[in-house]
Image: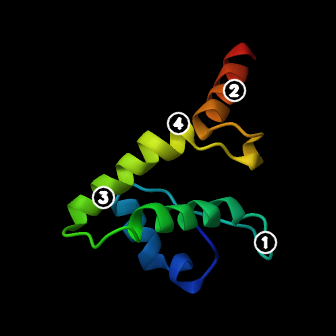
Amino acid sequence: MHSDRGAQYTSWLYGARLRQAGLMGSMGKVACAYDNALMETFWGSLQIEVLDRKAWATRAELASAIFEWIEALYYPHRRHSALGYRTPLEYEHLHISAAVAA
């Protein structure tokens, strides 16, 4: 779970809850506007393309829609200029192939 260095994200309780959920926390650098830009773009796209499209009846329905959006659209098909106009999946495979070759 990547976040900024806000007090709510640096608290001991928040870190403990992340660990209970099996997640690891990470934080951006201090005073680095570009560090969080890609994540902000991701959240903006999710907001416009999924969250604001309808009123969700249950959390399970929303969770399913978010999962489907990430795994079926965003990750394998959405090209990003920051990744050389590759999809996240293509970009990941480039680095996996390079690591295996080394």
First in sequence, mark 2 or 1: give its number.
1
Q: Residue at x 75, y 68 (%)?
A: 29
Viewed as shown, does residue 5 lie left or right of 84?
left
Which of the two discs, 2 and 4, sits closer to the camera? 4
Q: Amino acid at mark 2?
A: Leu
Number of numbered tags placed on the structure image: 4
First in sequence, mark 2 or 3: give its number.
3
Q: Residue at x 72, y 14 (%)?
A: 101
Looking at the image, do the residues carrying marks 2 and 3 touch, with CB atoms under 8 Å apart? Answer: no
Residue 95, position in %: x, y? Answer: 69, 29
* Residue for badge 4: 76
Residue 43, position in %: x, y? Answer: 54, 65
Q: Amino acid at mark 1?
A: Ala
* Residue for badge 2: 94
Which of the two discs, 3 and 1, sits closer to the camera? 3
Q: Is 59 rendered above or below residue 8?
A: above
Q: Quadrant of residue 32?
A: bottom right
Q: Is 66 rendered above or below residue 89?
A: below
First in sequence, mark 3 or 1: give its number.
1
Q: Quadrant of residue 40?
A: bottom right
Viewed as shown, does residue 13 lie left or right of 91?
left
Looking at the image, do the residues carrying marks 3 and 1 touch, with CB atoms under 8 Å apart? Answer: no
Q: Is 89 rendered above or below residue 18?
A: above
Q: CA distance from mark 2 to mark 3?
A: 29 Å
Q: CA distance from mark 2 to mark 1?
A: 27 Å
Q: CA distance from mark 2 to mark 4?
A: 14 Å
* Residue for badge 1: 33
Q: Which secondary structure, mark 3?
A: helix
Viewed as shown, does residue 71 lie left or right of 40?
left
